Image (tube, grey):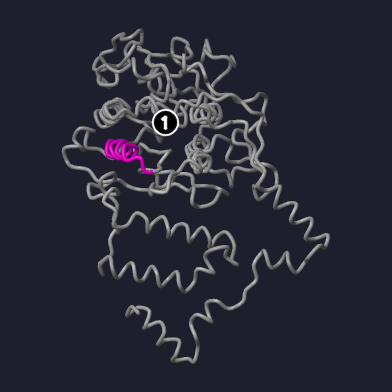
Amino acid sequence: MSNEQEKINQYFRNYGWDYKAFYNRPHWTRRRFFQVLGGSLTASYLAERYVKAADVTSSGAATKNTAKNVIFILLAGAPSHSDTFDLKVVSGTTPTSFAPQTANGVLWPTGLMPKLGDMLGDFAIVRSVRAHGLVHTLAQTWTQIGRNPAAALGNIAPNIGSVVAIEKDPQRTPGQIFPAFLALNSGAGVGSGYLPAVYAPFKVIPATGGIANTTNPDGQATFNNRWKLMHSLDDNLRVNSPDGKPMEDYDNFYTMGEGMMYNPVVNQAFGYTAADAARYGNSGTGNACLVASQVLKANQGTRFIQITSNDGWDMHTNIYSAANLPAKTKILDNAVSQLISDLQANGLFDTTMVVMVGEFGRTIGPLTGAAGRDHHPQQFAVFAGGGVKGGTIIGTTDATANDVVDYGWSQDRYVYAEDIEATIYSAMGIDWTTVRHDDPLGRGFEYVPTTGPFLFYPVHELWG
């Protein structure tokens, strides 16, 4: 018997109790509740509702099913579309340092993003994207959940990554120990909503040393003894818990954490050298892209990675100053170009879809009186890998990038956040018309909402 367990035994003996009898005392479970109710009308009704809650329906839409993983890069703060991925040169305004050149049929600011300019054949740009709202927090949340956060299910809607995690859970193998949904530099990112906490994002700020606290200061043997003791005491409160889903979620959290301790593959994937960080530009966004590449290479069950670029894209003043757009685009250029290169080198590019989008765009033409650009609904989205045809441009804007003149896709309208969500699901082989009937409001949770003036749809033109 371990010293830890003997201490527990002695504590209970001091009070005349038996710890096993205490922790295994009778308690009510849902199963016992239904046994007592027997065949009553109430039990029948509740049981029927419970069965229906597990129902999942769909229209059987045909998906592309070309991607195994997704890296979703949120450009928080909203970059100026007309200065970057939908460049429009404004006489007397656009700095000559942008060095605009036409490459692969695309007018490109080679002075801002030369590395991505050399890779235009590897990614696609959708220029007919339109934001629903122009408030940062609202629009950022909308982008992550693919629906109106202020709508009926907005408060319980899960992140797109959580939907991917629950859909791909049956494909996990016993040896895979990483969470299905990883969120890097995304402390304020949307969580799992009403879905079980096991599908919530595992939020990490990348560091050279990897993930902290994956060892115990008292040693592995002592940790293992304490882990076994904990389960001997209260497994009946964790498994099919009488306290319901929150306690079971907590147990899953513990179990997943324990699986990542004393495992060398963890810090091999999450840690990195100074030389590797330099390849990605020595930035927070670069380090996140580096870790994303390594985690997918480890093949430990992670299927969706969200990276939040908190580099300061909200440029209302002095947008062209050296510390603003030139500096931020350099960070992005170094990070994303190296991510694409490493995914290609590791053989993961064809099965990993990279999606990059902000929450909205920026005002166009001459700068404001503060030498900046304010909020504007017109924006862009970038797609790469996962079967997407590189070099594709979908949508054409007018001379100032104020609005769309050619939508460039089958639905002949703007592309919205919901369409991007549907595109991700289709790429991952997930039926975007799926409806889950397990939401707490009993309304039925649609993966992609169907309310509105039209149905949302994947941008399948990205596949050529």
The percent position of residue 410, horizontal first and vertical second, equals: 57, 14
Q: Is residue 86 left or right of residue 211?
A: right
Residue 84 figure quarter = top left
Crowd tier of the residue under label 1, counting other residues whose Cα lies within 10 Å: few below 14, some 14–19, many 20 or above: many
Looking at the image, residue 408 lies above or below residue 446:
above
Q: Amino acid at mark 1?
A: Ala
Q: Going 51% across and 23% down the picture, which residue do you hit?
A: 64
The percent position of residue 443, horizontal first and vertical second, equals: 70, 43
Q: Going 44% across and 22% down the picture, which residue do you hit?
A: 380
The percent position of residue 25, horizontal first and vertical second, equals: 58, 78
Looking at the image, residue 281 lies above or below residue 200:
above
Residue, disc 1: 78
Q: Going 80% across and 60% down the picture, which residue do you hit?
A: 42
Q: Is residue 415 magenta?
A: no
Classified by dominant secondary structure, the portion drawn in magenta counts as helix
Q: Is residue 298 magenta?
A: yes
Which quadrant is home to the N terminus?
bottom left
Q: Is residue 268 left or right of residue 146?
A: left
Q: Which residues are magenta?
A: 286-300
The percent position of residue 11, horizontal first and vertical second, equals: 42, 86
Q: Going 69% across and 68% down the picture, which residue do you hit?
A: 32
